[in-house]
Image (cartoon, helix red, strand yellow):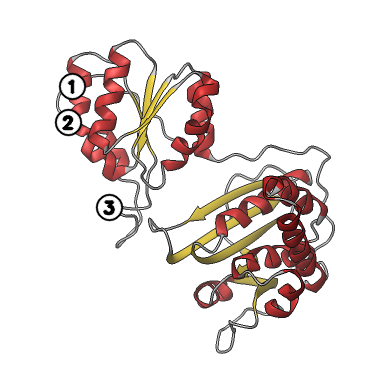
Amino acid sequence: MTRTLVFGIGGAAGDGIASVGDLLARVASRSGLHIFVYNCYQSVIRGGHVFLSCRVGEEKVTNHGDNLHILMALNQDTLNQHAQDVVPGGLILFNGDKFSIDGLTLQEDVTVCALPVKELMAPHGRLPILQNTLLLGAALKGAGLPLSPLMDLIKRQFASKGEKVITMNTGIAQAGWDAGPDALHPPWNGDSNARAVATGNQLFAMGAYAAGCRFYCAYPMTPATSILHWFAPRAEELGMVVKQMEDEIAVIAATIGASHAGARAMCATSGGGFALMTEAIGMAAITETPLVVINVQRGGPSTGLPTKTEQADFNQVFGASQGEFPRAIVAP
């Protein structure tokens, strides 16, 4: 496989890790490169530890890799947990006004870039949340990736919020680029094809609609909620019924009802929600009602990772509900 580079972005929920990861992925894809993004996050609104990795390559990338070349740390916890994972010749970027690598063990020849965030952001507005955009600008320069796609993406993303917001964000991205280190890696040999960026959940939703799904029902549950987020704003345009219910029992009952009435129906949840759906699946079996359920698996039982990682939802799906009836289980 030709050269690949792994970016790591870490912080707490609410720090904007997903948004900066999305921008990074789109910059790489618009530069004719391939990407694979893995986002590890807790089932919380704010706080906790969130870590996103984005692997960029000149050929198709099929996994997020074992190494870490560029680390963007949005809090001290990320430095403490991941600084030692950056390979020799890599780069660590963080807010030098607040955080420090003192006492941390680093591998050889790692470039440390402690950015003076307050000073760099002062001409553009000191919104703390925008440190992620500043670090991204610096990381792109260090990785040898162009800044212009990021500027275009920012203009598109904030077009509805006016020129002032666009200017602030592009100015901060430029400030990060100017303060970032020279490229640590040779030029990329990407092709000239800009590629679409999509998540697995978005592709599940698109595929379901293409296959004739016209009823979708869900209760928000990490990490399945983004399927609902894709369907909800497009329901009228697609001619679909999209329902958010009060719990997973209501979800499965409504989906069975829609399917029994003749609609192609689907719902989605995660392991804990699927456990609540189990009894009603038996009702679908006894009435011979077709049913599609997506179980977006968490990293372990309950809220995710209490003691160990596993893929036990396979067992749960295989033995769900009572009775013998045909089921097709497909896992990517």
Q: Residues within 10 Å of mark 3 (few under 14, many from 20)?
A: few
Per the image, label 3 sits on a secondary structure element best described as: loop
Residue 150, position as x, y percentages in the image: 75, 53
**173 relative to 97 in the view: left or right:** right
Q: Which mark is residue 190?
A: none
| Residue on which disc 1 sits | 283
Which numbered dot is residue 302? 3
Q: Are marks 1 and 2 in contact (CB under 8 Å)?
A: yes
Residue farthest to the bottom, as pictured: 103
Residue that appears at 33% across and 53% down: 300
Of 61 and 9, nearer the camera is 9
Q: Measured along the vertical axis of the image, is residue 86 above or below residue 154?
A: below
Say what amino acid the circle numbered 1 marks.
Answer: Met
Q: Rounded to the nearest whole Å, what is the CA distance between mark 3 and mark 1?
A: 25 Å
Q: Look at the numbered disc 1 and give the secondary structure of its residue.
A: helix
Query: x, y (%) of residue 65?
Result: 58, 55
The residue wearing badge 2 is 279
Q: Earlier in the sequence, mark 2 or mark 3?
A: 2
